[in-house]
Image (tube, coloured by chain):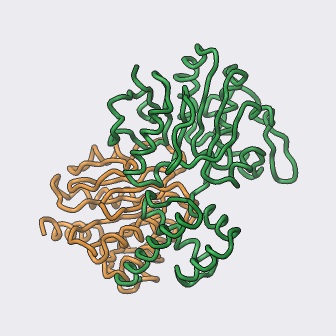
C-alpha cells in the first residue's frame, strides 16, 4: 500500500519557530524529503512565517494551498486557521473543521494523516511548546512503525509539549536540535 | 490501526460511499479522502460505534441518523467575516464595480448555517446595494439552510464577530443588525429579504442562473481535484463576463482548466474576475 517515499512532519508551538529554524537551516536546497511544518499561531494572524523561513533557509519555504503537491527541497508551512491533511496522491487537503486541542492547525491532525499515507516512512518531530497537541499524533506515527522524535526537554524553551509526547510514546527518540539535524542529514539522498 | 486494518477501513468506506449514493442519492465519490476518513472516524467515536459495518446498519435503517451523519461528514464550521481582509477587499474592489449594474445577482455557494451570507448582506446593505441585489444561498444540506434562513447565532461568538466586522471596514454599530435573546442573537430578517434559499449539490447539480459574483469559501477544499474541476467549470458557466469569484484564502484556480480565463483582483484574498 505504501510506496517508499518519505515525509518529515514537524510540529511545535511556543519556541517551535526557533527550534525548527535551527534544524532546517542546516539542510541543503536539494534536500530529498519534503518537510511539513505545523506551528500554532494566533488565529486570523496575517504575519508571514513563509517570509521568515524563506530568508533563513536554503530550502524553499511555501505556505500550503489546498491541493499543493509535495516536492523535495521544500518546507510546507501550515496556514493559519486550517488543519492540514495528506492525500494518497501526495497532495495536501486543507480542512477548516473544529479545533483540535484548542488548535487549528492541529499537530495531531497532520501527524495522523501523514502516518496514514506514509506509514513507516513517516518521520514525526515534536518540538518545544506549551500545549499537549502533537503527542497523540506522534504516538500514532510510532504505532505505524514510523520514526518518532521529540526535542530534548532540557533544551526546549517550553517543555510541556515534549514531556507530554515522551510520556505517551516512551519509545520515542529524545534528541537536541543538533542531533535532529544530523539525523535528517543521514536520511538525505537515501 | 495496522496497515491491513487501515486498508480494510478504506475499502469499507469506499463501499459505503457507493451504497449511500444508491440509497440516498448523495454522491461523496469526489470528496477528498483524507478528510472523509477523518470525519468518519470522528463520527464513529462520537456515536461509540465499533465498525463501519455497525455504522452501515444505522445509516440504512434510520433516515434521521443519516441526516445527522450528513451533517457531520459535510463540515459546517463557519463564522461571520472570516478573514476580514476578504470582506474589506470585496467592499473596496468589487462592490463599487457591481454598483454600476442596475440589478445584481450573487451566489453564496455552500452557505452552511448562514454566517457568510449575513456578512455579505451587511456589506451590500452598507454600500447601498442590498435593495437591488438578489442573493441565491445554496447548500447540499437542507437542515443548515433552515438555520441560515433564521439567522440565529450563538451570542458567545459576538465579540469575535464584532471585531471582525470592524476589521472588514464595518461602518455602523454592529449591534444594530441583531437583537439578543437568551444567549443567542437573531439577525434582522430584512437583511435576507432578497435571499432565495435552496438546496443545491455542487457535486451533482448543474448551473441554474447567471451571477455577477459567486462566493464559495472553504467548500471545495473537501473535494478532490476532479470534483473541484467540475465545480470550477460550473462556476464559470454561471458567471457573467467580467463577473467575480471569491474563494477561500488558501484555494486557487491555478491548477484548474479555467485559470486562463480569470485574472486576480486581489491575489492575497483569492478574488478573481472573469476576463471579457
Q: Is residue A42 left or right of residue A94?
A: right
Classify the position of the N terminus of chain B by image quarter: bottom left
Residue B231: % across, % down: 45, 44
User: Residue farthest to the left?
Assistant: A189
What residue is rendered at 33% in x and 69% in y?
A117
Residue B197: % across, % down: 69, 41
Q: Nearer the viewer, residue A64 or B13?
A: B13
Q: Nearer the viewer, residue B121 or A31?
A: B121
What residue is rendered at 45% in x and 73% in y?
B15
Is residue A86 depicted above or below B117 in this figure? below
Among the chains, which one is orange? A
User: Residue farthest to the front?
Assistant: B22
Q: Nearer the viewer, residue B180 or B44?
A: B44
Residue A27: % across, % down: 19, 58
- Residue A166 lies in quadrant: bottom left
What residue is rendered at 28% in x and 77% in y?
A120
Residue B40: % across, % down: 53, 70
Amino acid at each position: 500500500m505504501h510506496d517508499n517515499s518519505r515525509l518529515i512532519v514537524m510540529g511545535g508551538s511556543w519556541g517551535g519557530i526557533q527550534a525548527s529554524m535551527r534544524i532546517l537551516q542546516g539542510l541543503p536546497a536539494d534536500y530529498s524529503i519534503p518537510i511539513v511544518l505545523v506551528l500554532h499561531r494566533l488565529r486570523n494572524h496575517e504575519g508571514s512565517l513563509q517570509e521568515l523561513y524563506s530568508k533563513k533557509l536554503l530550502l524553499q519555504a511555501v505556505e500550503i494551498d489546498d491541493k499543493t503537491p509535495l516536492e523535495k527541497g521544500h518546507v510546507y508551512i501550515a496556514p493559519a486557521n486550517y488543519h492540514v491533511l495528506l492525500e494518497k496522491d501526495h497532495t495536501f487537503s486543507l480542512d477548516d473543521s473544529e479545533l483540535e486541542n484548542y488548535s487549528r492547525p492541529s499537530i495531531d491532525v497532520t501527524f495522523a494523516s501523514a502516518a496514514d499515507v506514509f506509514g513507516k516512512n513517516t518521520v514525526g518531530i515534536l518540538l518545544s511548546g506549551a500545549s499537549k497537541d502533537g503527542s497523540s499524533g506522534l504516538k500514532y506515527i510510532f504505532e505505524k512503525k514510523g520514526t518518532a522524535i521529540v526535542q530534548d526537554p532540557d533544551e526546549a524553551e517550553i517543555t510541556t509539549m515534549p514531556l507530554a509526547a515522551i510520556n505517551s510514546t516512551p519509545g520515542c527518540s529524545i534528541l537536541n536540535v543538533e542531533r535532529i539535524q544530523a539525523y535528517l542529514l543521514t536520511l538525505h539522498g537515501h | 490501526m495496522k496497515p491491513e486494518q487501515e486498508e480494510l477501513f478504506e475499502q469499507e468506506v469506499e463501499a459505503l460511499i457507493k451504497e449511500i449514493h444508491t440509497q440516498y442519492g448523495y454522491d461523496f465519490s469526489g470528496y477528498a479522502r483524507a478528510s472523509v476518513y477523518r470525519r468518519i472516524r470522528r463520527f464513529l467515536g462520537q456515536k461509540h460505534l465499533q465498525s463501519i459495518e455497525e455504522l452501515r446498519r444505522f445509516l440504512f435503517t434510520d433516515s434521521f441518523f443519516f441526516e445527522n451523519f450528513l451533517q457531520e461528514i459535510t463540515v459546517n464550521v463557519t463564522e461571520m467575516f472570516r478573514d476580514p481582509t476578504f470582506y474589506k477587499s470585496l467592499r473596496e474592489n468589487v462592490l463599487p464595480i457591481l454598483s454600476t449594474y442596475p440589478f445584481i445577482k450573487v451566489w453564496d455557494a455552500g452557505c452552511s448555517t448562514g454566517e457568510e451570507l449575513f456578512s455579505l448582506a451587511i456589506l451590500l446593505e452598507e454600500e447601498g446595494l442590498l435593495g437591488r441585489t438578489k442573493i441565491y444561498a445554496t447548500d447540499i444540506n437542507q437542515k443548515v439552510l433552515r438555520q441560515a434562513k433564521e439567522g440565529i447565532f450563538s451570542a458567545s461568538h459576538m465579540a469575535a464577530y464584532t471585531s471582525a466586522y470592524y476589521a472588514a471596514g464595518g461602518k455602523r454599530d454592529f449591534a444594530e443588525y441583531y437583537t439578543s435573546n437568551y444567549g443567542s442573537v437573531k439577525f434582522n430578517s430584512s437583511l435576507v429579504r432578497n435571499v432565495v434559499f435552496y438546496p443545491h449539490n455542487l457535486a451533482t447539480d448543474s448551473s441554474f442562473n447567471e451571477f455577477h459574483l459567486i462566493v464559495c469559501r472553504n467548500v471545495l477544499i473537501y473535494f478532490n481535484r476532479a470534483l473541484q474541476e467540475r465545480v470550477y467549470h460550473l462556476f464559470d458557466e454561471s458567471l457573467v463576463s467580467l463577473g467575480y469569484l471569491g474563494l477561500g484564502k488558501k484555494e486557487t484556480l491555478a491548477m484548474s482548466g479555467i485559470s486562463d480565463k480569470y485574472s486576480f483582483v486581489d491575489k492575497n484574498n483569492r478574488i478573481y474576475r472573469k476576463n471579457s
